[in-house]
């Protein structure tokens, strides 16, 4: 089911090209209708939200607010086993993210000079959570917990109502456990617009995060600049580096765990063993049959699944660095010995017993990761995503006297005489 | 010259609206021609660069490379006074930015579990430096030094050639002192395209930073995603908080130091003293006359200059937090007492002897700052801008046994059976 290639310069280049050809680009009709929706919400506020919810979610609401008692009901419905797992996951995620809290600093110098940097949490953050079949309570934890740890004052969640005007109970339960401050039943581009511009009910936020369909993604792009957004998630990848000792049952299962997300997801096996590849092929066919999303998996593997045969684990990692996958599994012994070679990967899953879903749900690392090769320059969602920095500097009269001339020289060479003037008037 | 307002709810809202109305949005003809240029460079490489350089920079080059001997000539031409100032500025900027270096971390747990985060410098960064009248050597330092401190492997600078095929000597000198690895004489959208896609001569980078005109800004937006970019700089602001003891000569000089940048720059005085405002008005008129860019200053002050009268310094800072200025001067006694109130500002200049140009050139803080109200959620350019993070996690067989059931429960509730399967095959 995987496209077979042996590694060489040409195959490397082809590989990159084929991955780049995957795209979630919105067509013009989407762009146009999203622009219209945003304009409507901006101008008409809540009224527009009620109308659009009726049109797209096919439900007439009296209020967007999800109440405390709604949430308690969600917890009830979700069941104890799920809630217990969620709570333990939350603890793990919190523990991992707390280490990311950055401190400001100050430098003190001669002549009374001091300067430094402060770290300040964002005031208000909006988290988009899809409804329907892509309703992922784990995403609630992954987006909300880092914002909480960062110290964000107010976290607002938006999620589309179902046809009865309720919300997915697992989503509601996760929101309550994660500590979301307010939840509104509104989805799509209209929810993004409400968060960016504010309405009578929904207060304007500073940043919008969370996954969504093409309408949500397009709306986020359009309001970027007015508010900050997280990455626009592209199609995701798993790259499994495996050797002759790797268990083909495991390898196949892990490749499919990513392939099931999307027809344009990409599952890539990079291995030193052609024999392993052959066994993995058999396993893919066998296991695929009993998985719910087998149609998606088959199409994803057919179009973007690959097996690449290399000479050594080092060469496997070389390939991985070129692809810069969202998820990288290093299914080898002593995996820490190889971690230093990994330069471009969102998250690395080490050894033979760390399938990627451990990171999706439970282990503690964030599952919002750079996709489509952007791990070359983007980072996982983290506490840093919910803070900003602000610098400060103090010069005394004596310090200006000492350094003033040099500053004037530099300003003059740039032709900025008003810059120079602000120093001159103080000398 | 400043528009006078007393503070109230309406004036606050008007203020924000008027600042938002400033815009650097490219019109369609710019967008179209930038798209064409990018396509041409992507397809034709160096050949396109030579052609476009001849068309736009009116010079026929034999080579884009700036040699070591060209740079030594720049140093010569720039003169000792300038070079000495530049070197001292570099030391200050380096000292300030070194404190920003982040460390990775690791958490070790029971059952062999460990997880953590690594901090990895970007491999290659491109720095765009404008030529002509907006050639700012200080920008070279501000963009290159944090990348150097971050540990970027290769820093490539691009800057348009002048009509004789040379480069601005101050820019060349700053590049040499900052430690740029390679410099190419190419500018405009074609330079951005070359950095994003690579050509025979210019190697593809991971991130493009640095200021530029509307064509450069538009090109950066278009290649974003393929590479990372810094912020798209909008019109800039200075907001001066002053009291009755503030020196109107200083206040006026500082307001104009920002106003001279751009007709749509915004200089705002927020003060507790109407008397001060009146004196500042006189000073603006007087000092303006002897400044080179007085036409720009007058237009900027006329359209976007404001004086806002408040009851207290606390209220002044309140206004400032709403505006979220790029530069904030707190021209008061004991300014550190007020810093905690400042929530939204790119850089804060404290006290009566710290005019903003100290930070532009010399003090050590970065001058690449969030503009147009984006200090609510964006940060100054920093070492963080040139690194990425990558997480890792290890689970042992025992740990999967212990936690596997919970992960399966969570995956099942999301309908992702292939996720659950990757755990099941290991139990």
Image (spheres, coloured by chain):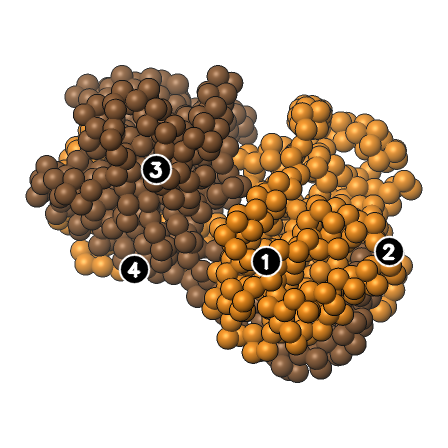
Chain colours: A orange, B brown
Picture quadrant of residue B189? top left
Q: Are marks 4 and 3 in contact (CB under 8 Å)?
A: no
- Secondary structure category for the residue under label 3: strand
Question: Mark 4 or mark 1: which is in front?
Answer: 1
Q: In this figure, which residue is indicated by the disc labeled 3?
A: B128
Q: Chain of mark 4?
A: A
Q: Are marks 4 and 1 in contact (CB under 8 Å)?
A: no
- Compared with A211, A85 (above or below) is below
- Counting labels gives 4
- Secondary structure category for the residue under label 4: strand
- Which residue shows up at 27% across the image and 58% down it? B95
| Residue B63 visible in the current orientation | yes
Q: CA distance from mark 1 to mark 2?
A: 32 Å
Marks 4 and 3 belong to one chain = no
Indicate which disc, 1 or 2, sits on the residue closer to the N terminus: 1
- Compared with A405, A92 (above or below) is below
Q: Chain of mark 2?
A: A
Q: Where does the image place residue A345, in percent across and percent down from the top left?
A: 55, 58
- Secondary structure category for the residue under label 2: loop
Q: In this figure, which residue is indicated by the disc labeled 4?
A: A107
- Which residue shows up at 28% across the image and 26% down it? B260
Marking on residue A6: 1
Marking on residue A292: 2
| Residue placed most toward the observer, A222 or B191 | B191
Indicate which disc, 4 or 2, sits on the residue closer to the N terminus: 4
* Apparent side of residue A313 relative to residue B46 in the rendered image (left or right): right
* Apparent side of residue A413 relative to residue B385 in the rendered image (left or right): left
């Amino acid at each position: 089911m995987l496209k077979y290639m042996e590694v060489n310069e040409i195959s490397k280049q082809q590989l990159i090209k084929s991955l780049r050809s995957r795209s979630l680009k919105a067509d013009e009709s989407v762009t146009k209708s999203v622009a219209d929706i945003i304009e409507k919400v901006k101008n008409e506020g809540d009224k527009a939200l009620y109308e659009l919810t009726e049109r797209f979610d096919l439900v007439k609401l009296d209020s967007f607010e999800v109440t405390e008692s709604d949430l308690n009901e969600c917890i009830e419905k979700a069941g104890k086993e799920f809630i217990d797992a969620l709570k333990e996951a939350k603890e793990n995620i919190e523990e991992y993210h707390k280490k990311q809290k950055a401190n400001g600093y100050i430098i003190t110098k001669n002549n009374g000079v001091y300067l430094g940097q402060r770290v300040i949490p964002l005031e208000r953050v909006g988290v988009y959570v899809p409804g329907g079949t892509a309703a992922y309570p784990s995403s609630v934890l992954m987006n909300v917990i880092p914002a909480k740890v960062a110290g964000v004052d107010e976290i607002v969640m938006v999620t589309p109502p179902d046809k009865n005007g309720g919300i997915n109970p697992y989503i509601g339960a996760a929101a309550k456990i994660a500590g979301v401050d307010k939840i509104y039943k509104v989805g799509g581009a209209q929810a993004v617009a409400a968060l960016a511009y504010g309405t009578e009910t929904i207060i304007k936020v500073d940043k919008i995060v969370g996954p969504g369909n093409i309408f949500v993604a397009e709306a986020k792009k359009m309001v970027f600049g007015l508010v900050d957004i997280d990455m626009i998630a592209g199609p995701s990848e798993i790259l499994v580096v495996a050797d002759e000792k790797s268990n083909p049952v495991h390898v196949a299962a892990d490749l499919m765990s990513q392939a099931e997300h999307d027809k344009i997801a990409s599952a890539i096996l990079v291995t030193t063993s052609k024999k392993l590849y052959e066994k993995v092929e058999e396993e893919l066919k066998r296991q695929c049959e009993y998985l719910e999303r087998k149609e998606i998996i088959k199409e994803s593997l057919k179009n973007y699944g690959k097996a690449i045969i290399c000479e050594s684990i080092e060469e496997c990692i070389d390939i991985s660095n070129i692809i810069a996958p969202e998820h990288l599994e290093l299914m080898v012994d002593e995996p820490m010995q190889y971690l230093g070679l990994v330069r471009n990967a969102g998250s690395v899953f080490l050894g033979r017993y760390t399938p990627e879903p451990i990171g999706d749900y439970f282990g503690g690392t964030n599952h919002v990761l750079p996709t489509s090769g952007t791990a070359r320059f983007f980072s996982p969602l983290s506490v840093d995503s919910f803070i900003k920095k602000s610098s400060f500097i103090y010069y005394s009269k004596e310090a200006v006297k000492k350094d003033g001339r040099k500053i004037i020289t530099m300003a003059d060479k740039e032709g900025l005489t008003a810059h120079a003037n602000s120093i001159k008037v103080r000398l």
